[in-house]
Image (tube, helix red, strand yellow):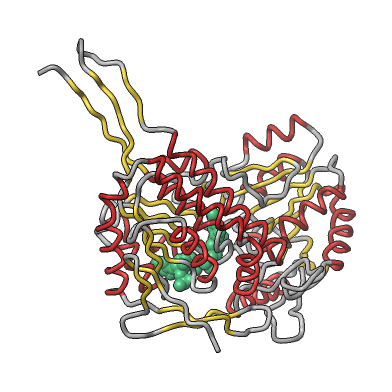
Amino acid sequence: MTNAYKNYIGGTWVTASDGATFPNHNPANDFVVGTFPKLTREDTQLAIRAAHDALPAWANTPPPARGAILDKASQIISSRVDEIATVLTREEGKTRAEARGEVMRARDILRYYSGEGWRGGGDVLPSNTTGELLYSKREPLGVVSIITPWNFPIAIPTWKIAPALAFGNTIIFKPASDAPQTGLMLVEALIDAGLPAGVLNFVTGSGGVVGDELASSVHVQGLSFTGSTAVGSGIYGQAIKNFTRVQLEMGGKNALVVLADADLDVAVSLTVAGGFGLTGQACTATSRVIAEQSIADEFVRRLADAARKLKVGDGLQDGIQMGPAVNRSQWETDLHYIEVGRSEEAQLVVGGSPLPGSGLFVQPTVFDHVEPQMTIAQEEIFGPVISVLRARDFDHALELANAVPYGLTAGVVTNDLHKAFAFANAIDAGVVKINEPTTGLALQAPFGGFKQSSANTFKEQGQAAVEFYTRTKTIYIGHG
Ligand code: NAP
């Protein structure tokens, strides 16, 4: 029998008012792993109302007490890592090792923000008037909508929800319809840790209905969205009509530059980790490699060997190194871009086909001799497809790396310190990696893209999150 999961609004487990549901599939075998409520617009408004009603008490809860709940939730997640990781792999597809890493990241993020209860607050400033006390204090922003994608279904919700709660906001959280169960397990951990009713509301359903209501409601003070640039740009227009504070982190077309002096085995392992890890379904994935001409043939030969050896399959099985596409639409997108690459006459070196069977698997794929104007060099694919472009020299490599509308992450492989710094200074990307994969982030460091990868408003993670989730009030106290 299929599990029928519920939503959590105002401290009560609920279904959609009309009883509608949608199925959640395992992409490795197409089995239904559960159903979730498909909320209506009016149901979503009830969740916003619940968050609104819970705000005064939560905002006035002493920050250390809020932090203690996050700490407890971190411990609960810690005790359930394997269970949550299995659910994550089953609904999203990444390997069990990748899923465990993500769940442990969520645990650590909660632990990090639990400490915020004892930090921050504001500044006491020099006054222009004798005897006056002039200070600023940070207050919660208010009710915040959190809309997340499927590809990191616990890490991304956690890096938004944890700071939002630590700083005293109340939340309506809508996970992606392709991976809602992992997000639900995060919500359960916070409820079990003692979060009061209404502070965190969990809603599922269509992005165009539930997400749209969360983005366009006049009763929401903040909207934090991670997802595609297409959806993000649409909801930005709605949110700013109400002067809602907006944070959008979106797509990428990330390049790893391999310079002539690079250790090619290191360059290959960084490319495989960044391009095929997580099935290429990371916003920070390496989807372009820009190799200096003199080493490009040898680099591509070694990369193709490594790609051929990767074990692709159901992420719950031992030894699997790359899982399936998350859903049929993403699988078709991957295969579509492979066809486009062929038709634009890029050279297919390895992969390029689906695997037989019912799972949504695509072979790790490498195209060589990709030209910068080609579609596969410009558009986000979000699958295990790497385009290799060739550069005449360092300056040309930098020019190619910057020649896309996105600017999320970028990397360079080199032992030349001067070129490493020159790259870090000139690249138009929010995160730069030297001799590291383009994927992978430190939870204590600011994260966010440039150009069309972001709304370029507020960074996420680390101390940067305080800016988005608080508003600053300035107070002058004179003697009258
Ligand atoms: P998506 O299709 O844009 O969906 C993201 C979220 O928005 C989902 O919860 C979705 O709900 C919801 N949504 C869809 N249409 C909406 C609408 N009209 N109004 C409000 N919400 C709406 O993205 P995705 O396919 O889940 O994720 C992949 C994308 O996320 C890639 O482009 C990737 O680069 C990006 N990403 C960026 C980062 C980053 O930090 N920069 C990190 C991870 C992923 P439904 O699921 O119900 O449609």
Instruction: Please indicate whether residue 377 sits to the left or right of residue 235 in the image.
Output: right
**Does residue 52 appear anywhere in the picture?**
yes
Q: Quadrant of residue 211?
A: bottom left
Furthest residue in direction left, as rendered: 480
Whether 326 is drawn above or below 413: the answer is below
Residue 477 lies left or right of residue 296; in this view the side is: left
Location of the C terminus by quadrant is top left
Looking at the picture, how far across and down is residue 202, in whole percent? Answer: 40, 66
Q: Nearer the viewer, residue 62 or 280?
A: 62
Residue 302 percent coordinates (x, y): 88, 58
Q: Residue 331 or 45: which is nearer the viewer?
A: 45
- Give how far across and how far down residue 350 sits, in percent: 82, 69
Residue drawn 53% across the image and 57% down it: 156
Q: Residue at x 84, y 59 (%)?
A: 303
Say which of 160 and 375 sits in front.
160
Q: Quadrant of residue 372?
A: bottom right
Q: Residue at x 62, y 48 (%)?
A: 409
Residue 234 vertical placement versus 450 (above, below):
below
**Left or right: 378 with respect to 390?**
left
Name the quarter where the N terminus is drawn: bottom right
84 up-or-down from 291: above or below: below
- Note whether residue 405 is visible: no
Q: What is the count of numbered marks?
A: 0
Point out residue 199 in the picture as x, y percentages from the top left corner: 35, 57
Is 371 on the left or on the right of 184, as rendered?
right
Instruction: Choose top left, top right, bottom left or bottom right for residue 313.
Output: bottom right
Q: Residue at x 31, y 66 (%)?
A: 47
* Furthest residue toward top: 130
Question: Where 235 falls versus 60 (above or below)?
Answer: below
